Image (tube, rainbow, N blue to C red):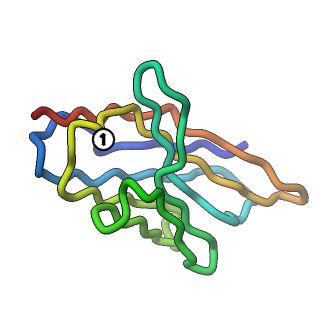
């Protein structure tokens, strides 16, 4: 069993920055990829950014140039640096991870609220 614990959400004014963290804990696993999704009220959950074990990244068009995903493999932690935040970035942000322990499992974090005021 792997647990993902997110932190770093909060309230920020438009144009501000936040940094989200997601730490994976457990035993006997290796991480294949981690990412961040978000879900705004009344909308579907959408991919924000992802990063593979090799460091390849992928971003939603809406956040390119403003958000940066990174990971510290020694800590099994992924980060999302969010700059130039806009009110439309307001959502619950979820961390996810694909991990291998003989087979591949997919895990979700509990979510952290990000609110951007105009």
Residue under the point 36% across and 57% down = 63
**Image x and y of residue 73, in percent:** 53, 72
Residue at which label 1 appears: 89
Measured along the vertical axis of the image, is residue 117 above or below residue 46? above
Is residue 105 left or right of 50 when viewed as pictured? right
**In the image shown, does 27 or 5 lie closer to the viewer?**
5
Measured along the vertical axis of the image, is residue 81 above or below residue 4? below
Measured along the vertical axis of the image, is residue 110 above or below residue 4? above
Residue under the point 82% across and 58% down = 101
**In the image shown, does 14 or 17 lie closer to the viewer?**
14
Q: Residue furthest right?
A: 102
Is residue 105 left or right of 12 when viewed as pictured? right
Quarter of the rendering occupied by the N terminus: top right
**Image x and y of residue 83, in percent:** 21, 58
Mark 1 residue element: helix
**Image x and y of residue 35, in percent:** 54, 55
Residue 109 image-quadrant placement: top right
Residue under the point 83% across and 55% down = 104
Measured along the vertical axis of the image, is residue 103 above or below residue 5? below
Residue under the point 36% across and 32% down = 91
């Amino acid at each position: 069993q792997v647990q993902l614990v997110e932190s770093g959400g909060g309230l920020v004014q438009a144009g501000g920055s936040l940094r989200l963290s997601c730490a994976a804990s457990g035993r006997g696993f290796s991480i294949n990829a981690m990412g961040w999704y978000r879900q705004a009220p009344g909308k579907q959950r959408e991919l924000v950014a992802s990063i593979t074990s090799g460091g390849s990244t992928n971003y939603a068009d809406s956040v390119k140039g403003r958000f940066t995903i990174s990971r510290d493999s020694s800590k099994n932690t992924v980060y999302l640096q969010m700059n130039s935040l806009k009110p439309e970035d307001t959502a619950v942000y979820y961390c996810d991870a694909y991990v291998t322990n003989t087979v591949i499992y997919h895990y979700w974090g509990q979510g952290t609220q990000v609110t951007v005021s105009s």
